[in-house]
Image (cartoon, rainbow, N blue to C red):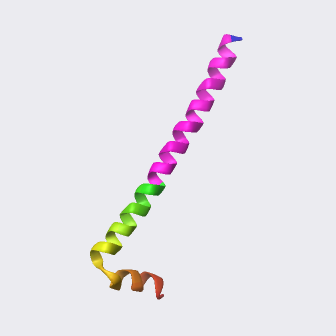
Amino acid sequence: MATSTVQADAKFLRRIFLGLVFLTLVTGGLAGLTTVQAMTGSAASCASSCE
């Protein structure tokens, strides 16, 4: 019985960990995009959105 709860806990923790990693990657990517757009100015954002 103890091993099954340990396995369930490991699966649950792994799911939380993967979710956190995914969230970090997404927010990091979005922050990087906005930073690049702000640094390069409105020309880059127009080039990407006007196509």
Q: Main secondary structure of the magenta part?
A: helix
Q: Residue at x 41, y 85 (%)?
A: 46
Tell me which corner region of the image, top left, top right, bottom left or bottom right, holds residue 19. Answer: top right
Check the image and name the residue furthest to the left. 39
Tell me which corner region of the image, top left, top right, bottom left or bottom right, holds residue 33. Answer: bottom left
Residue 33 placement, left or right of 10 = left
Q: State the count of labels.
A: 0
Q: Residue at x 66, y 11 (%)?
A: 2
Residue 20 placement, left or right of 10 = left
The stretch drawn in magenta includes residue 37:
no
The stretch drawn in magenta includes residue 14:
yes
**In the picture shown, does residue 19 fall above or below 37?**
above
State the image coordinates of residue 22 (x, y, percent, origin top left): 51, 49
The N terminus appears in which quarter of the rendering?
top right
Check the image and name the residue furthest to the right. 1
Residue 41 placement, left or right of 31 = left
State the image coordinates of residue 40 (x, y, percent, origin top left): 29, 77
The span picked out in magenta is 2-25
Residue 40 placement, left or right of 30 = left
**In the picture shown, does residue 50 fall above or below 32?**
below
**In the picture shown, does residue 16 fall above or below 31?**
above
Q: Residue at x 59, y 37 (%)?
A: 15
Tell me which corner region of the image, top left, top right, bottom left or bottom right, holds residue 42. Answer: bottom left
State the image coordinates of residue 37 (x, y, percent, origin top left): 35, 74
State the image coordinates of residue 16 (x, y, percent, origin top left): 56, 37
Check the image and name the residue furthest to the bottom. 50
Q: Residue at x 59, y 26 (%)?
A: 10
